[in-house]
Image: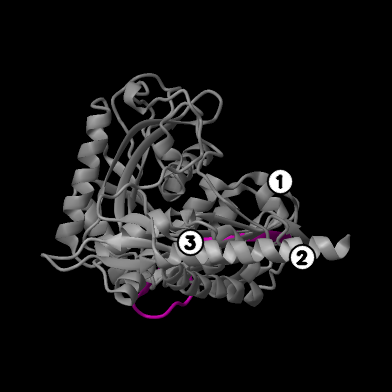
Amino acid sequence: MNQGTNVTVTVPKTESEAPIIVGLDIGTTKIAAIAGRKNEYGKLEILGFGRANSNGVQHGQVLNIDQTIKAIQQALLNCAESNPDLEINEVYVGVAGHHIKSLQTRGDIVRQDADTEIKQWEIDQLVENQRKTFIPAGDQIIDVIPQDFHVDNIQNIKDPVGFNGVKVGANFHIITGDRNAIRNINRAVERSGLKTKDLVLQPLASSSAVMSDVDMEAGVAILDIGGGTSDLAVFYEGTLRHTAVIPFGGENITNDIRMGLGVLKSQAEAMKVQFGSALSNEAKANAFITIPGLKGMPAKEISVKNLANIIQARMAEILDFVTYHLKQVGMDNRALNGGVILTGGGSQLTHLIQLTEYITGLNARIGYPTEHLAPNHIDELRKPMYSTCIGLILKGYSDYENKTKDFHQRYTRVAVPGNLKTSDFVNVTEPLKTDAVDTRKRKGLNSFWDKFKDSIIDLFKEETDMEIK
């Protein structure tokens, strides 16, 4: 799961200088901190970057606060080392996990003077009223998102400010979460020396990083495959239609491999990343992975085909959930012309696009967080696993530009560090390298049968040619 923190640097400069916002992604497998600021072209310049292995987080929820704090502090330390000029105070935090739920509501307000134009404060009051919606005990509202407004008999209004009318209302998408789970996130962030500026639903953050206005208008489903959960956000006609947290992610695939093939978790992860495929039909039947034996035990050979079978089974389960949610909200292949955008660390599996298209019936592509990123930063930051983190920075800028939250008016001028710059713009993810795993093909008998099979095929080709002649 990816989560983010917004950091505002408060050393004075000029009032026109934009704030520096940092995303802190508290995930199941990694914790990443990215500091960014928009340049004069409206693109994000990355001013600091740090990551650390995540401990204490399972399925998107903080279970061990002390271990999570250590991982957050290590990520912040690495971020500070990449740019010593940064000062991190406030943070936007992403949230996901099994406890996340959503519901649809509708609200209206009756205006006293129908001849005056609708003001922004009235819309703010309409949104705030929805926070009084009844939700189950133990939950709390994370966000209230207007979908479309109506003024009297005029429907499907994007922004009602400036309209005249007696009654103004809207349909809302309300996101809720378990109060204790949210408290643990805030506690881990605060005990790391930071202040939580806001909580942002992870799939919404990822969506803002990988999606353009054209995607939103065409209709698109964003699937962020994280370590502990896979998060879904569906957009249609420019508005958010549905969100869901699917309780499976990359860690589940790794555990399936570990148990199914009888290997260590580190070996299972290495095999998944380096040799895994989401389509078993595309895996070579005669390719094997050799795993070194433990403490003098003989080496173990793992079939690449068996590995792919395990991965495909779990990924198909995740995609079945996606299909279910799309049908629940009436979004099928006729509505979502933009198809499915896959992002997050799990989206880098080989042949995942083909499996997604087969199961959902929609076109699919990988979503890289480059839509709003300035083109002069290290390739590492362009990987799908950082979509949530970069999206959290964008959420902070949305708050800043729309003045929905208070920000300091003076900021430090911080340059992009040289170690975060690159002249190449490449969206290719380099495969992880591991000393513990190495691929081979079986020699001897397999080679003999391969040659025998090829000779039989050639023989049939010759006979066919003779018949045609």
- The residue to which callout 1 is attached is 162
Q: Mark 2 falls on what kind of element? A: helix
Place of residue 272 in the rendered image (x, y in percent of width and height, measured from the top left): 38, 60
- The residue to which callout 2 is attached is 463
Is residue 241 placed above or below 16 in the rendered structure?
A: below
- The residue to which callout 3 is attached is 277
Q: Residue at x 31, y 22 (%)?
A: 12
Q: Quadrant of residue 437?
A: bottom left
Q: Earlier in the sequence, mark 2 or mark 1?
A: 1
Is residue 344 placed above or below 455 in the rendered structure?
A: above
- In the rendered image, which quarter contains the N terminus? bottom left
**Mark 3 residue type:** Ser
Q: Residue at x 56, y 68 (%)?
A: 281
**Mark 2 residue type:** Glu
Q: Is residue 144 magenta?
A: yes
Depth-wise, is mark 2 or mark 3 nearer the camera?
2
Q: Is residue 38 magenta?
A: no
Q: Which residues are magenta?
A: 130-153
Q: Earlier in the sequence, mark 1 or mark 3?
A: 1
Place of residue 396 in the rendered image (x, y in percent of width and height, measured from the top left): 44, 43
Depth-wise, is mark 1 or mark 3 nearer the camera?
3
